[in-house]
Amino acid sequence: MLTLESEMTVPGVTGREVADFMLDCDDDRYRAWWPGTHEAFHVVEPGSRSDHVGDRVWMDELVGERHLRMAAVVVAVTPGELIVWRLVPWGLRLPVRLALTLQDQPDGVRLRHTLTAGWAGWGRMLDPLWRLYFTRAFAAAMDRHACTEFPRLGKLLHPPQDPAR
């Protein structure tokens, strides 16, 4: 199993605010989060549950030099604490998951962004192939990306007040 993980504290927001934003995002809000880097993130097909499990989503963004386009389905939600997406490019159920783990702190939310790739059982012998796509350079770019984007989310959700008002 391959795991790429980034962890940070995002000041001024709660886990619920981050989770709600991610689960109810649309392209305009996603682009406003990080203009020029975030291109699209929206629900393509809603799931049948009110907690968003089963929602099919589309994400399009730049991570370092790589242009990522991701079709995924929400497979787990714990409100304000956890969201897990499973990648399903071309309708294939790949063993690749992206998880956001959120823990409220006095100064904001502790956020862990985890990308995992790997099979269970006999398929584990194919796991080294993931390194061809998830290279060390990509892992470093993903860490820089996550550690840059999430602090920006606090500013989007709670813009500074204009002192002239």
Image (cartoon, grey):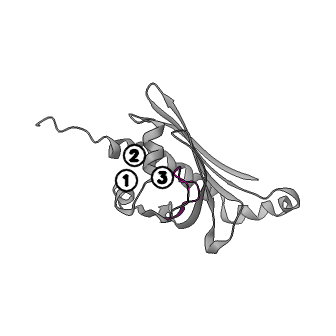
Q: Secondary structure at mark 3?
A: helix
Magenta stretch: includes residue 26: no
Q: Is residue 56 left or right of residue 130?
A: left
Decide: marks 3, 1 in contact (CB < 8 A)? no
Q: Amino acid at mark 3?
A: Leu
The overriding secondary structure of the stretch rendered in magenta is loop
Density class for disc 2 (Cα within 10 Å; few <14, some 14-19, many ≥20) is: many
Distance from Cα at disc 3 to Cα at disc 1: 14 Å
Density class for disc 3 (Cα within 10 Å; few <14, some 14-19, many ≥20) is: many
Residue 104, percent from left and from top = 50, 31
* Rendered residue at 15%/34% (across/down): 163
**Disc with the residue nearer the chain's start (1 vs 2):** 1
Decide: marks 1, 2 in contact (CB < 8 A)? yes
Residue designated by label 2? 153
Distance from Cα at disc 2 to Cα at disc 3: 14 Å
Residue designated by label 1? 33
* Rendered residue at 31%/40% (across/down): 158
Boundaries of the magenta span: 49-59
**Disc with the residue nearer the chain's start (3 vs 1):** 3
Residue 112, percent from left and from top = 57, 41
Residue designated by label 3? 23
* Residue 81: quarter of image: top right
